[in-house]
Amino acid sequence: MQQILLIDNYDSFTHNLIQLLEESGIPNNLNIITNDIDMSLAPIGVDKVIISPGPGLPHEAGNLLQLITFYADWTSMLGICLGHQAIAVAYGAKLKQLRHSAHGIGSPIKQLQNDSLFSGIDEMIICGRYHSWVIDEDTLPDVINVTARDSDTNIMAISHKILSIKGLQFHPESYMTQFGKQIIRNWLSE
């Protein structure tokens, strides 16, 4: 049974994400910590780390950036919304504020590459979005691939070129996201 660690960034969507993990049909043992955990207490023996959405910016989220660095080399990792942004920031990217925030909207997302997260899923899907910031592509390090975009070419999904690290700007746990359960199932199956 996989040992899954969920890093909770104090977001109301975390409960939806937990439910999605439980309904995935893939056996897992879920352990939950908050982003302000003392680093000396960070669990080991973890197979996968999922980073929840949350308010604010990555540098305001407790020890989130340190937790990403701690787990990055030896676990499979998936960041959602703030978690996605934090992964990019941990690797040296910067964020930029959207001209018009995308809170509570469903918008089309297009896959750009053959990414295992999107296996068995249409190339274009509608995704639930709740954010005011996106990764600034001009600052994205070479080690990160862009795997999906919105219609304004904003980065909606990323994947590390070497490590098993992925991020989604949109919310797979949102009722607005098509194939959200399949995306989580694909990640758990990797």
Image (spheres, rainbow, N blue to C red):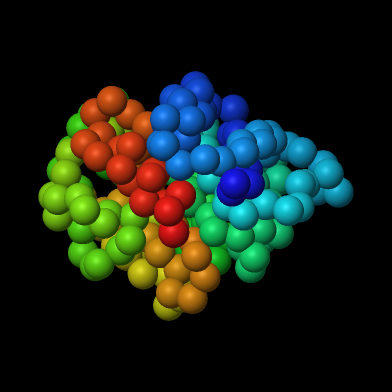
Corner quadrant of residue 90: bottom right
Please indicate whether residue 17 sits to the left or right of residue 125 in the image.
right
Q: State whether residue 144 is above or below residue 29.
A: below
Quadrant for the C terminus, please. bottom left
Report the number of numbered marks: 0
Corner quadrant of residue 51: top right
Q: State whether residue 133 is above or below residue 94.
A: above
Residue 106 is situated, as x and y percent measured from the top left of the image, at: 20, 32
Q: Which residue is rendered at x = 61% and y = 60% of the image?
A: 75
From the viewer's side, name the closer residue of 135 and 19.
19
From the viewer's side, name the closer residue of 174 and 95.
174
Q: State whether residue 100 is above or below residue 140.
A: above
Residue 177 is situated, as x and y percent measured from the top left of the image, at: 25, 34
Q: Is residue 96 visible?
A: no
Please indicate whether residue 161 sits to the left or right of residue 54 in the image.
left
Q: Which residue is rendered at x = 48% and y = 30% of the image?
A: 22
Residue 153 is situated, as x and y percent measured from the top left of the image, at: 20, 56
Q: Which residue is rendered at x = 52% and y = 70% of the image?
A: 163
Residue 7 is situated, as x and y percent measured from the top left of the image, at: 61, 40
